[in-house]
Image: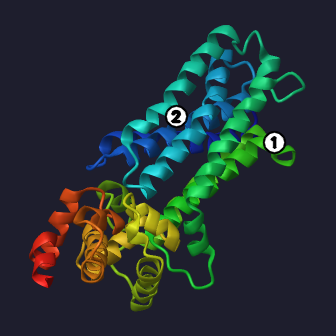
Amino acid sequence: MDLEDQLLFLFSALGGVNGLFLSAYFAFYIKRRNETTYFLSALLFVISIRVTKSAFFAFYSDISTHFIQFGLSACLLIGPFLFLHVRSTTDREYKSWNWLVHILPIIAGMIFLGYFYPYHEYRYLWQRGEHGFLGWFLYIHWFFYLSYASYLVKSSFRRVFSKNPIMSNEDIWLVNVVLGVWVVFLAYYTHSYTSYIVGALSFSFTFYISILLWILRKGKMSTFFESHEKYASKIMRDEESNSIALKLDELFVEKQLFKNPDLKLTDVAKEMGIVPNYLSQYLNDHLNKSFSSFINEYRVHAAEKMLHSNQFLTLEAIGYECGFKSNSTFYSAFKKIKGVTPGKFKKNLE
């Protein structure tokens, strides 16, 4: 290689090496590791493998076909790990074991394809040609998960790109990660942007820009990942809290959302178009209440009104009507808020 190619290879491979370094950092070295950081680590690892394969293949076409197949197969895991990172970041109630459903079948498929359809014998199947169904499947699978992850952070996109943005550090991070993976995907997929080396360069550029934006916004990058703070920001402006208060009033007073016994924080946040952390922050910082306490107050208030006006329904029926899932939770919440049980409250009315 001449000097120009050597420099191009150096900068291209730098994206993959940097990704591998950060992957190890998030997996082993930050103080408070959790599933969100592990999914980010895995995402960085599989993208780095794909990028490194591209960088070497562009300049060393005689590299091992096993390495090429390994790099191509990594595409199958980029989308799922991005989705899992986004989902675990935005949904605190997402069950951690669900990642097995997305990852284990893919790993099994990679082993099957590598054994029965190895790249060195079935190269045409791994390319996006007329008979390259494996090559097409890699990108379709990647595109599906990437689109799903984008859908999950649509509210973050709206806040980041709105004229009057009310956004958190979490919004900025998620938007940058998703956009970065889109750039890498398009770098490999589109006909006008097909150079292998462009894919490597685009990853380096996108990831460095993401880190830069994070540093400018936060002051330091590690805090978000190491503490994985319960709230995206500790400061909420008055206009923001007023906006949330008005939306909550509409949902709980007018629409009586609390009557849904399976109502979750994520459901309410989705209705309001904000991230769950932001709603949780508002309830704790401005109302000094947990989400369960907040909705139980509405339910108890509704039950109190029914006890005053309805003489036909049983106490259990009133509890269910107001959104309580069981008689015991109804009695417990009512006594905690009103100081007496529903039965005694009703008796005092007589």
Report x, y in % for residue 186: 74, 48
Q: Could you tell me the amino acid type at mark 1? A: Thr
Circle 2 sits on which residue?
Answer: 102
Image quadrant containing the N terminus: top right
| Residue at the extreme front | 312
User: Would you identify the image quadrant in which residue 128 lies?
Assistant: top right
Residue at point 74%, 46% (across, down): 187
In front: 304, or 36? 304
**x then y, percent, for residue 272:** 50, 73
Q: Element under label 1?
A: loop
Task: Report the residue marked by disc 1.
Answer: 194
Q: Nearer the viewer, residue 84 or 1?
A: 84
Residue density around tag 2, few if under 14, some if 14–19, many if 20 or more, within 10 Å: some
Distance from disc 1 to disc 2, alpha carbons, whole Å, reads 28 Å
Q: Find residue 292 and report its image quarter.
A: bottom left
Amino acid type at circle 2 is His
Whether residue 198 appears in this view of the structure is: no
- Quadrant into which the C terminus falls: bottom left
